[in-house]
Image (cartoon, coloured by chain):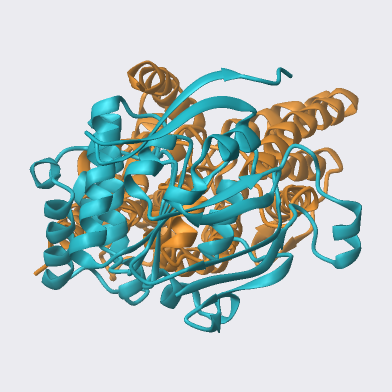
Chain colours: A cyan, B orange
Amino acid sequence: MLKADSVTYIHGARTTDDLAKGSRADVPGVRDVSLTVERGAIIGLLGPNGSGKTTLLRVLAGVLAPTAGRVTLDGVNLASIARRERARRIAVVPQETHLAFDFSVREVVLMGRYPHLGAFELEGPHDLVVARDALAATGTEHLEHRPFATLSGGEKQRVVIASALAQQADLLLLDEPTASLDLGYQLAIASLVARLNRERGLTVVVATHDLNFAAGLCGSLVLLRGGTMLGSGPTAETLTAASIQALYDVDARVWFDQGAGRIAVLPIEKTRHV
Amino acid sequence: MSDVRRRLFGWTALLGAVALAAIVGAPLVGTTRINLARAFDSAVPFADNVDAQILFIARLPRVLAAALVGAALAAAGVVFQALLRNPLATPFTLGVSAGAALGAVLAISLKLQVSLWGVSAVTGASFAGSLGAVAIVYALARARHQGFSTNVLLLAGVTLNSFFSALILFVQYIADPNETVQTLRWLMGDLGVAGYGPILAALPPTIAAFVAFAWLPKTMNLLSLGADAAESRGVDVARAQRVAFFAASLATGAAVSLGGPIGFIGIIVPHLVRLLVGADHRIVLPAAALLGAAFLIGCDVVARLVMAPVELPVGIITSMIGGPFFLWLLVRQR
């Protein structure tokens, strides 16, 4: 169970003095966010650009240390857990991955084995088994020997998810995993994440802009705007016309669609123009 | 045996053999033919043995210097490229060589004649200059950021490069014109070292840098995913970046103070190696060091022979090969 207790992160601030002065306007921070990620849950982080979704994910991943408050993993302060140990329990999938060099898909997936290996230890047969299993789970086994750079956006995202799976963490944090993908790939990623949650018991926290993606995938939602939490709760109660208005200043129709078996969102227009 | 291990052993064995062949073969090549049997004939005293003198005094130090400088610059190139996540970075991108050049030019212009343990003032001053540049760039990269910003690092390095170049021009302008020739020759990159002293002096910092390099390849692989992704997989990114920066700078400083700023080795060799062995730094790094040694020895043989009896500074040869190669890389990049 991952828990955030009134977590605040202000970029560049290291003391409470800095904190009082506030954040540089261009870097979104988060203020006083508390949330609990129960084992096996899929939680969506919703909010407009600059609302602090990515910052919150990075704090939850332990990549950023909170300026105030704390994040605990099964009751242990995340900051006190060694990096490699943390990486064996929490895996992160960034929004987009550009490699600086021309690694193959297999090499990228094997990079997920880093926290399981000694400093000079090379990957053994067991690591290859884990990597192939991760490739199979994401439907990318046929790409194993391809250069990563030659893949399409959707293929890249699935391979990066496979690399995260190779970490064998039970908590997966995804940052707008469908932001640069077309409709088909968006749905493919959603069903992949749902299946990993169902079959492998992965706990998932996913930041997204796509309200229908969130409605179909997430059991509960956390709403962020301007770095503070507007609300949280089960998706059916949280994803409402009122909350979309509060988050985005957008007038939207929200209904339970019998055919789809889930909530559907139709944004109509922006009500306040900036 | 794992795939990585098999490729690592295969490539190091192959390129190691190439480097060794270059070290053994290159001293035998030159404008004067030497008789090997006579050179190793212990009956002839060394003072009278012209073949042995050519082999051990004129040629071997040059070849060993080329091996050391080539290995250091190629490996430093790999590390800087991984650190900056930019395949077009070179060991000179961050101003290390410009600092070294300023040191050397000052020593030449001030006619510093002191030498210590066979190391001339020019060599010592250029090494000091490279360390100074490293310190400035590092302080700048730290100042604007709580961590270690590679963007600031890059900008600071590029700016420092042109600032030092201006200082060098200034010193040259007010200096005695006679020294300009010596300065120019140094700036071209030249392996005409005097004896084994400078090589021995460059050895400790180079070895220290390579010991640090040994720790880096796996983290460099992960860094190419991006700093956040590497951190989330358990890499101590800030520490890896610090080690990479200082070790690569140290290797560059040692190489440049020994052979001058020999251009393009630090980018041609890493790219050739990546074409051969792939992207995995665990193989790329040792392979680049070995190929860098062999490549620079080869270039130096060409420099000695192409306009014989005139010996060209090797930097002219590497730049003539490297310039077009660099452009080809730029065009080839997606």
Q: Is residue B184 above or below residue A92?
A: above
In depth, the one of B251 and A222 nearer the eye is: A222
The image quarter containing residue A8 is bottom right
In the rendered structure, the answer to whether residue B312 lies left or right of residue B95 reads left
* Residue B199 at least partly seen: yes
Give residue B306's position: percent from left, percent from top: 37, 23
Which residue appears at 78% of the width and 34% of the height?
B164
Q: Residue at the bottom extreme?
A: A75
Give residue B252's position: percent from left, percent from top: 56, 50
Give residue B22's position: percent from left, percent from top: 27, 48
Which residue appears at 74% of the width and 65% of the height?
A67
Which residue appears at 49% of the width and 23% of the height?
A267
Give residue B128's position: percent from left, percent from top: 74, 55
* Residue B58 at least partly seen: no
Which residue appears at 71% of the width and 17% of the height?
A273
Q: Quadrant of the N terminus of chain A?
A: bottom left
The image quarter containing residue B11 is bottom left
